[in-house]
Amino acid sequence: MTHTEDEVAGLLLAAGGGRRLGGRPKALLTHRGRPLVEHAVEVLRAAGCARVHVVLGAAADTVRERARLDGCVLVDNPRWELGMGSSLRAGLGSLAGTGARAALVSLVDQPGIGAEAVARVLAAYEDESSLVAAAYGGVRGHPVLFGAAHWAGVASSATGDRGARVYLKAHDEAVRLVECGDVASPYDIDTSEDLARLE
């Protein structure tokens, strides 16, 4: 195991209830014949994250039953309805004491972002002070890597659906952008029209 694999944990935010999808939990949408959450975990692993924490919220029990998430640490976010910020806080909290020195955060509803893009962000990790984000045509997107030195700040500013946006904006100059637009497409699966993007 390389030092990067050992020190950087994948953190998958998969708690969303799919309000604009008629309340269908995003983790259980089908992509390439299996739940989206399985696909997203596999992308993190293929990119080099040996350790993966998955934050569950909407229909968490059903996700546990239907999705094969062997070897993942499953983190329940009972407050998932408060938005992505609460899931980010729960996920970062679950990494405390694990020895992880950075968290590579990805979203379950972005299947157009594959292992190649995630691996690029992972490769830019240096130490606990690292702050790295994928960029698409120069515009910051996901995944985002937060060194442990940033976790408390991210957690305290993560509210509603903004996630880490406020923190990243405040630390704009420290964020290293890694262009991924040539290998990934950062669309979200948010509405019923977006479902056509799933395979």
Image (cartoon, rainbow, N blue to C red):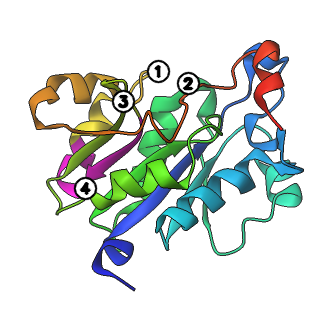
In the rendering, at what x and y percent does residue 113 appear?
Answer: 56, 41
Q: Is residue 122 above or below residue 189?
A: below
Residue that extends furthest to the bottom in the rendered view of this protein: 1
Structural crowding at the residue carrying mark 3, measured as other residues with C-alpha within 10 Å and reported as few (<14), some (14–19) or many (≥20):
many
Given this view, does label 4 or label 3 mark the residue nearer the observer?
Answer: 4
Give the residue type that dot 4 points to: Ala
Task: Give whichever of discs 1 and 2 has the lower sequence position.
Answer: 2
Q: Image quarter for residue 137?
A: top left
Element carrying mark 1:
loop
From which residue to which does the magenta span run? 142-152
Q: Say which of marks 4 and 2 sits in front.
A: 4
Residue at the disc numbered 4: 124
* In this picture, residue 26 sits left or right of residue 104: right
What distance separates the C-alpha of mark 1 from that of mark 2?
6 Å
Percent coordinates x, y for residue 55 in the rendering: 59, 49
Distance from disc 4 to disc 3, alpha carbons, whole Å, reads 23 Å
The answer to whether mark 1 and mark 4 are in CB contact below 8 A is: no
Q: CA distance from mark 3 to mark 1?
A: 7 Å
Can you tell which of label 1 and label 4 is closer to the viewer? 4
Q: Residue at x 63, y 58 (%)?
A: 41
The answer to whether 135 is drawn above or below residue 50 in the figure is above
Q: CA distance from mark 4 to mark 2?
A: 31 Å
Q: Is residue 20 magenta?
A: no
User: Which amino acid does the dot numbered 2 rest on?
Assistant: Leu
Upstream in sequence: badge 2 or badge 3: 2
The residue depicted at 28 percent of the width and 49 percent of the height is 146
Q: Earlier in the sequence, mark 4 or mark 2?
A: 2
Front one among 197 and 10: 197
Which image quarter is the N terminus in? bottom left
- Residue that numbered label 3 is attached to: 158
Q: Report the residue marked by disc 2.
A: 82
